[in-house]
Amino acid sequence: MSPATDTLEAEVPAGQKINVHTRAGDRSATGGDPVPGMAADPRAGQSPIDDASLRGYPPIAPETPGFEVAAMRRFLDGEQAAIKNRVRALLCRPEFRYYEGTDKEGLRDKVFGWAKTIANEGIGGLFMPKSVGGQDNLAQFMAAFETLGFHDISLVIKFGVQFGLWGGSVLRLGTDYHHQKYLPGTATMALPGCFAMTEISHGSNVRDIETTAVYDPATQTFDLHSPTFTAGKNYIGNAGRDGKVATVFAQLRTGGELQGVHAFVVPIRDEEGRPLPGVRLEDNGQKLGMNGVDNGRIWFDHVRVPRAEMLDKYAQVAPDGTYTSSIKNPAARFFTTLGTLVAGRISVGHSGLSIAKAGLAIAVRYAARRRQFGPAEGQPENILLDYPAHQRRLMPLLANAYALDAAFKHLTKTALTTDAAEFRQVETTAAALKAFSTWNTTHTLQTGREACGGEGYLAINRFAALKADSDIFTTFEGDNTVLMQLVAKNLLTDYAATFKGKSKGDLARWALGQKLALAADRNPFGGALRGDLLDAHTQRALFQRREERILAAAGAKVRALTAGGRMTAYAAFMSQQNVLLTLAFVHIERLVHARFDDAIRACPDASLRPSLARLRDLFALFHLEKGRAWFLESGLLSAARSRELTRQVDRLCAEARREAVSLVDAFGVPPECLAAPIALD
């Protein structure tokens, strides 16, 4: 049994032992009779097939890592180890066995039941105020959400919609009245809710959504209305079947004036699940994946909502229709309202990383047991993981996982402690990290599937579900390409702010400094850029210089295009869209590397640092290698140094391979969540 499994068993409640040779739910937690009330498993009595050693799979090749797996897992779990282990133990319970049927409604029933079980454990309400029975602990809630990413992804999103989006919007945009009225039922899932923002014609462009909310002082109600077909709320989780109420985002009009986008609590179904008068509901139907979530569309035909049901923490409408807000600037008010999305982006990105970790655990463990070809006829075949090409496929992705883990920990802690004045930096990083992580998840799963050959194509080995269900992560909570444009825009805005109030002399001195810095960078005999490629300071300098150069060039281009009214700022930005997307990518690569390096330096266990530093070096050099065309064109890398970069990446991949299984075991993916015969001991 692997060290990771030993660790997991030690943390499961006393008397429960996980049988890693069976699918979750095949047998009871103690290996006895089937769980009462569950359908008999068609594979019952086939224990020889359940034993990996008798299925024809050779054992995973032993390795001697330079660290203890349990210690590395403690490093990865960090301050939230207790809640993560609590969720892991929960996911190992027999009732959380994966649903393998093809019936959409059956899967929805199963996912709803799982979510309700989690709610009954008090996990959904962790972030809610103590006044409504919660723990007022958003950090624990986000850690639980991250850990659920090891399991069925429909459950992850059902959990996120109910508690993070619906419950989170009521908490962050509402007042005590809304908290007391809605959050207790939300915490138990007695009140399933929706987060109705996205529309058929307006997804990322929330500012221009079409749904209207017109206040009528005579009745003290808001008239919620979908004026067109395209104003229908679209792809709304819980709207297809289970949702009873929704946070609806609409254009508020009161006193004849448009006040912009605000949020309202609107009932959509009665207790029997029937649409309420004026509410039209439509199931989105079968999707590419994640069919355990009941996404749907919602239209409103002049639905009357009491004045008290506007979520009015930041803006209020008096009985006579007078509008007031503590945030005077309409743009600032709008972005404060959208602040509810930031925690969601962090959570989606982090759970996406958990999905990538699960895929890596399967692919790496399989590659450490699967043999193919050999040096000569009659001699033992080679393990897949010993092939340099296989190492090149998987080891950089392993480095990505560790680096992203450190970046998300730092971002989560910052988001929970930062003040409003610094919130835009959190927003920028959350957008960039969500995009970087979920794109990495998609790439990791495709690579992992291919690395497992035909075995990776079998549903039982999980890649089919992981790929199909996680594909949408690159789109929801903000389309990744749009998010990266937001990142670039914020970077440009911050860059432009550094020049405000500068005299012509200051600007001239700055330009001269830039030229001198450029000359120094091109100096082949010295400077930080010429240091050892395995030195973290050299790596940071290379990432930093690339970002600074691209940012300065993009900023200069936009300034030139807008000078003298030649082009609007919007048109100039759009003309440079591809360059600005590159800027966003190099920004987040630099930031992830920096956060990983910081985490290694702060690691209290010195025995872990050599292995972590190797992964940091691999992350840095792999991503620098991908961008070496720019470095060569800019004169920051010579041809010889570029070749050295590739040699070092190959060497680091070979070194990481020697402890790869232990590194994925440290993720702590429960064996039941792998559910992959090719990955189990």
Image: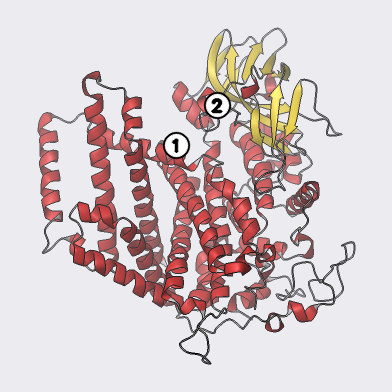
Q: Estimate the spatial distance between the alpha carbons at disc 2 and disc 1, rounded to whole Å.
A: 14 Å
Instruction: Report the amino acid beneath label 2.
Output: Tyr
Disc 2 marks which residue? Answer: 314
Q: Amino acid at mark 1?
A: Ala
Label 1: which secondary element: helix
Residue receiving disc 1 = 420
Please tell me how many numbered marks the rendered image carries. 2
Residue 504 in view (yes/no)? yes
Q: Position of residue 103 (x, y in %)?
A: 79, 50
Residue extending farthest bottom: 378
- Tell me: 671 left or right of 374: right
Mark seen at residue 272: none
Q: Is residue 80 above or below residue 656?
A: above
Q: 10 Å neighbourhood of mark 1: few (<14), some, or many (≥20)?
A: few
Q: Dot 2, how many residues are within 10 Å of its Cα: few (below 14), some (14-19), or many (20+)?
A: some
- Residue 133 lies, with reference to residue 282, above or below; the image says below
Residue 166 quadrant? top right
Identify whether 471 is placed above or below 263.
below
- Of labels 2 and 1, earlier in sequence is 2
- Is residue 498 something that shows in the picture? no
Q: Residue at x 61, y 83 (%)?
A: 59
